[in-house]
Amino acid sequence: MAQDEKARSRAARAERAEPEDDGARRGNPALTSRAAILAVVVCAIALSLAYPVREYIAQRKEIADLQHKEGVARGQVDELAQRKRQLGDKSYIEREATRRLHYCRPDVKCYIVLDGGGNEGQQTRKGGTPSRPPWYETLWRSVEAADRPR
């Protein structure tokens, strides 16, 4: 009897080991459960990394924009620092007062050159082109125009 049982167990093992019959009956599916689980895990990893990667790219762009703005601001600071140094120079202030406000120091004689072409009262620059009237003349003309009745 021991040999009968051995023969039966061998036959049972042989039936289990025959993949030809089993594969033919099930149709050998292309997507196994392991592949499905692997696909789900890969999708989960991709979805969990998508948002942080998008935020990283957005932050890098924001950093580049801020660095550009910082460079522009530094350029403005440099220009303003140079302007501050200029305005601290007494000779520059005197030149600007003479040029813009037609300021004349007491120890200097100032002249207004007329070109004789009918533009009396207007100063001329080098080259003979008339310049804008001084600010106070423009102000006075606007006051006179405002006083006139309509």
Image (tube, grey):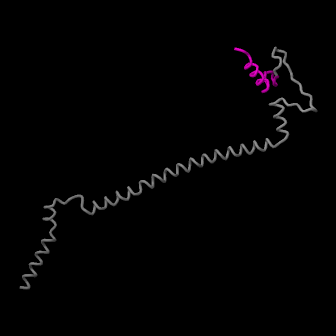
**Residue segment shown in magenta:** 123-150
Q: Quadrant of residue 123?
A: top right
Would residue 132 be seen by someone viewing this image from the given angle? no
Q: Which residue is located at x 83 percent, y 17 percent?
A: 120
Q: 139 above or below 57?
A: above
Quadrant for the C terminus in the image:
top right
Image coords of residue 128 (percent x, y)? 81, 21
Would residue 74 be seen by someone viewing this image from the given angle? yes
- Report if residue 129 lies within the magenta region: yes
Q: Which residue is located at x 78 percent, y 23 percent?
A: 140
Residue extending furthest toward the bottom:
2
Residue extending furthest toward the right:
107
Image coords of residue 13 (percent x, y)? 14, 75
Quadrant for the N terminus in the image:
bottom left
Q: Which of 11 and 101 is in front in this view?
A: 101
Q: In this view, does 107 lie to the left or right of 88?
A: right
Image coords of residue 38 (percent x, y)? 31, 61
Q: Quadrant of residue 5?
A: bottom left
Q: In this view, does 42 lie to the left or right of 63?
A: left
- Report if residue 148 lies within the magenta region: yes
Q: 115 above or below 84?
A: above
Q: Is residue 42 left or right of residue 81?
A: left
Q: 42 above or below 90?
A: below
Image coords of residue 7 (percent x, y)? 9, 79
